Image: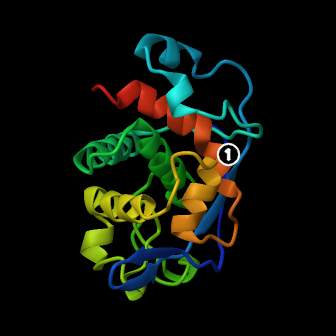
Amino acid sequence: MNSIIRKSVLGVAGLAFAGGLVGGPVAAVQAAPVTGPVSAVVVQESGADMGKLLPRGEPAGQSRIGLNEEQVANTKAIIAATKKAGMDERAAVVAIATALQESKLENLGHLGDRNDHDSQGLFQQRPSSGWGTVEQITDPEYSTLAFLKGLKQVDGWEEMPLTKAAQTVQVSAFPNHYAQWEKQAADLVAEHWKS
């Protein structure tokens, strides 16, 4: 597993709802890039259409982390919520890449002094910004549905680069960091979408 360096940063994430603007901050996390065919077997076995999951091809500068049982369970919860929202595999890729950047797919509670404002959960959403209660935003289904509600409101999100779609919802201080997780997110969707 790659070593992970976490640092909280002051960021602002936004999500436009009918009633106004709500948001949550971003926790920037960096991981060392992985080289080699780490996910080739998963993609071949899944039969997934990688052209649909990665419509712009595999981006340069990808990062990858090993996942534990909790992170895999959270991946599956994001996929289930995406299906519940009536959205496709590409929406799941955007959501999982966002959660990889925000929390490394860990359902984070309040981190005390290391916390970025009151950010919590998979997407680092903020109760004080209207994302929901602490109980809601730390529920993987609720937080995913809240993220996807914002994504649906981004006109043309399906055609834009993943990092731009995620950034439009999250409004991160580090808008380009989502892109580094696109390949791993696509591989996870390819592996778990039909399970």
* Residue 5 visible to the viewer: no
What number of labels is visible?
A: 1
| Image: 130 above or below 187 | below
Q: Nearer the viewer, residue 59 or 37?
A: 59
| Image: 44 above or below 79 | above
Q: Please tell me how crowded label 1 is: few (under 14), some (14-19), or many (20+) other residues with Cα within 10 Å.
A: many
Residue at point 38%, 39% (across, down): 72
Residue at point 30%, 78% (across, down): 132
Query: Which residue in the structure is indicated by mark 1?
Result: 180
Give the amino acid at mark 1: Gln
Q: Secondary structure at mark 1?
A: helix
| Image: 101 above or below 64 | below
Residue at point 45%, 63% (across, down): 123
Residue 74 place in picture, x, y as percent: 35, 47
Which quadrant does the N terminus fall into?
top right
Residue 128 place in picture, x, y as percent: 40, 88
| Image: 23 above or below 184 | below
Q: Tell whether 194 sits left or right of 117.
A: left
